[in-house]
Amino acid sequence: MTTIDVFISVFAVLSIALFLRRYFLNKNVVHVTATEARRRMSTGKAVFVDVRTSEERSRSLIQGSIHIPLQRLSDAGTLLASYRDREIIVYCASGSRSVPAAAKLTTMGFRTFNLDGGIGAWRRSST
């Protein structure tokens, strides 16, 4: 087996592992469209959690959202304790961070949803 063959094999295994991880995370996470998320926000049913970095958040955000960067998600139980009776809609730029974050919050006992399409979908839905 050549070095290239080993590289291709490792790449293939990692690709399959990432696909399976995303598949199983997605399977346990409920997704909402930006339109549905706006409706839930307007009725006061939901609170938004932004798991992006501070730099990303400084460029755009959903007004009233709570900022818990993905790296601090382990603190979410304490930070979100007063929101246990509300729905939590998690968002990031595209879903690559919000899907695992929503899955984690669900295992922590929150009623959690992922904003499908992230902040970009949110901005597009307002026009």
Image (tube, rainbow, N blue to C red):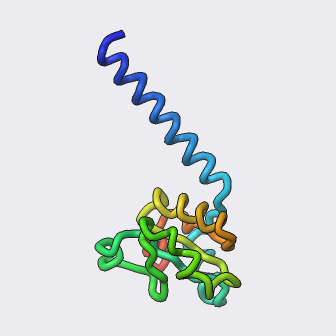
Viewer-proximal residue among 105 and 97:
105
4 left or right, relative to 106: left
Viewer-proximal residue among 74 and 92:
74
Residue 104 % position (x, y):
59, 63
109, above or below 84, in the image: above
Residue 37 % position (x, y):
59, 76
Residue 30 % position (x, y):
66, 63
* Picture residue at 53% right of the left edge, 41% below the top: 19
101, above or below 49, in the image: above
- Disc tally is 0
* Picture residue at 51% right of the left edge, 74% below the top: 75
* Picture residue at 65% right of the left edge, 68% below the top: 108
Residue 22 % position (x, y):
55, 48
* Picture residue at 60% right of the left edge, 46% below the top: 23
66, above or below 18, in the image: below
State which quarter of the image contains the N terminus: top left
100 left or right, relative to 62: right
Quadrant of the image occupied by residue 100? bottom right
Quadrant of the image occupied by residue 99? bottom right
Viewer-proximal residue among 107 and 57:
107
17 left or right, relative to 5: right
State which quarter of the image contains the C terminus: bottom left
